[in-house]
Image (tube, grey):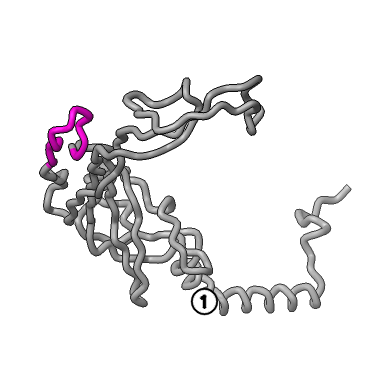
């Protein structure tokens, strides 16, 4: 048995060789175009400029006010003043069995009066607003008094593409603080122009290897 050193399937016909040459030529010709498409729109995303880091802090200010309402007389809120009552033979919702008293009442409640807000951008440090609160109007129910309510904080990166498109990406305070004031990133943008803020590079190194430069 002789050994020529050549596998039987390694020999191509002239037609196969010509087809392979055409395929290689087409791949080489389209390479720069594909590379550009991948750089701009591909897995690494669109290159954008981070032009600012902004912050906005909000506090709801609540005020004690009188409100009217209606409900079952044995379930009225604390401090309610009954204006009228009547007996219902049947609960329309079906949750109660038998007759029960239903009341029309007035009671003091805390309701949002306005939202105090402070805002700025790095390097200014975020600071909560300090609204001046009103005191009660002398009523024993504390009517007219104000208090601080729900707080919300918004830390965002302002991104801008070379074609003028802009986006805002909300961050946790820790990530917002860790990112540089101005830099470049790559971010995924869909065909409708919506940026996927979750595709921003993670902060893995203080040197900025993930900045997309």
Q: Position of residue 48 (x, y in %)?
A: 34, 65
Residue 158 occupies which quadrant of the picture? bottom left
- Relative to the observer, which residue lies in front, 87 or 189? 87
Q: Say whether residue 122 is magenta.
A: no
Q: Secondary structure at mark 1?
A: helix
- Relative to the observer, which residue lies in front, 114 or 68? 68
Q: Position of residue 194 (x, y in %)?
A: 46, 64
Residue 67 visible = yes
Q: Position of residue 133 (x, y in %)?
A: 13, 41
**What kind of secondary structure does the magenta stretch mostly adopt?**
loop
Residue 150 visible = no
Q: Residue at x 25, y 60 (%)?
A: 183
Of all residues shown, which one is farthest toward the right? Answer: 1
Query: Image quadrant for the C terminus?
Result: bottom left
Q: Position of residue 182 (x, y in %)?
A: 21, 60
Horizontal side of residue 123 vs 56, given as left or right: left
Horizontal side of residue 90 vs 3, given as left or right: left
Q: Which residue is mark 1?
A: 33
Q: Residue at x 10, y 44 (%)?
A: 132
**Position of 128 relative to 169 (above/below):** above
**Position of 169 relative to 127 (above/below):** below
Q: Say whether residue 134 is magenta.
A: yes
Horizontal side of residue 71 vs 47, given as left or right: right
| Within-10-Å neighbours for mark 1: few <14, some 14–19, many 20+ | few
Q: How many marks?
A: 1
Q: Residue at x 74, y 74 (%)?
A: 17
- Relative to the observer, which residue lies in front, 48 or 1? 48
Q: Which residues are magenta?
A: 133-144
């Amino acid at each position: 048995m002789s050994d020529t050193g050549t596998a039987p399937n390694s020999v191509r016909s002239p037609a196969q060789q010509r087809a392979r040459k055409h395929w290689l030529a087409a791949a080489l010709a389209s390479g720069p175009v594909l590379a550009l498409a991948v750089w701009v729109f591909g897995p690494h995303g669109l290159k954008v400029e981070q032009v600012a880091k902004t912050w906005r802090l909000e506090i709801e200010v609540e005020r004690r006010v009188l409100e009217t309402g209606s409900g079952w007389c044995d379930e009225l809120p604390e401090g309610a003043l009954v204006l009228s009552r009547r007996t219902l033979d049947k609960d329309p919702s079906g949750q109660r069995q038998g007759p029960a008293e239903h009341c029309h009442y007035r009671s003091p409640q805390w309701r949002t009066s306005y939202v105090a807000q402070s805002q700025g951008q790095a390097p200014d440090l975020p600071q909560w607003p300090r609204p001046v609160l009103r005191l009660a109007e002398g009523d024993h129910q504390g009517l007219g008094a104000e208090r601080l309510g729900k707080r919300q904080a918004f830390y965002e990166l302002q991104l801008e593409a070379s074609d003028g498109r802009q986006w805002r990406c909300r961050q946790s305070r820790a990530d917002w603080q860790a990112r540089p004031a101005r830099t470049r990133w790559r971010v995924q943008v869909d065909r409708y122009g919506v940026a996927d803020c979750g595709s921003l590079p993670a902060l893995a190194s203080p040197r900025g290897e993930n900045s997309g430069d």
